[in-house]
Image: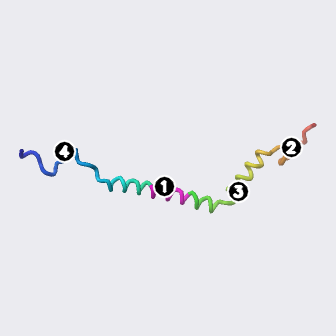
């Protein structure tokens, strides 16, 4: 049949297994870069992070630690 070219595929060929490996490695590289970026940001802003944790602890125990406003009657 002259209208069928040898370069045309019938759709039954298997995908290249290296294609999936390349996709996985690209996603893995993106995730590794994201984790590295978060780690570096936390390392750089360690003071801010520790102040945030301290403020959360203070707000959790605000009755015992903070004395803002007039004293309460017993």
Element at badge 4?
Answer: loop
- Gap in angstroms between the C-alphas marked 1 and 4: 37 Å
Q: Decide whether residue 67 is among the magenta residues.
A: no
Of mark 2 and mark 4, the one earlier in the sequence is 4
Query: Which residue is identified by label 2?
Result: 69
| Picture residue at 50% right of the left edge, 59% below the top | 33
Query: Which residue is identified by label 4?
Result: 10
- Gap in angstroms between the C-alphas marked 2 and 3: 26 Å
Q: What stretch is highlighted in magenta?
A: 28-37
Of 35 and 20, the residue lying toward us: 20
Of mark 1 and mark 2, the one earlier in the sequence is 1
Sort mark 2 into few (<14), some (14-19) or many (20+) by Cα contacts within 10 Å.
Answer: few
The rendered magenta stretch, by its main secondary structure, is classed as: helix
| Picture residue at 86% right of the left edge, 43% below the top | 69
- Gap in angstroms between the C-alphas marked 1 and 3: 25 Å
Of mark 1 and mark 3, the one earlier in the sequence is 1
Sort mark 1 into few (<14), some (14-19) or many (20+) by Cα contacts within 10 Å.
Answer: few
Sort mark 4 into few (<14), some (14-19) or many (20+) by Cα contacts within 10 Å.
Answer: few
Left or right for 21, reference 46: left
Given this view, does label 3 or label 4 mark the residue nearer the observer? Answer: 4
Element at badge 2?
Answer: loop
Given this view, does label 2 or label 4 mark the residue nearer the observer? Answer: 4
| Picture residue at 41% right of the left edge, 57% below the top | 25
| Picture residue at 58% right of the left edge, 61% below the top | 40
Check residue 31 in the rendering and tell me which mark sits there, or answer none.
1
Query: Which residue is identified by label 3?
Result: 50
């Amino acid at each position: 049949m002259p209208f069928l070219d040898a370069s045309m595929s019938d759709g039954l060929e298997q995908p290249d297994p290296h294609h999936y490996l390349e996709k996985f490695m690209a996603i893995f590289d993106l995730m590794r870069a994201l984790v590295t970026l978060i780690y570096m940001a936390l390392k750089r802003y360690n003071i801010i992070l520790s102040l945030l944790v301290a403020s959360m602890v203070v707000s959790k125990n605000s009755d015992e630690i903070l004395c803002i406003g007039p004293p309460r009657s017993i």
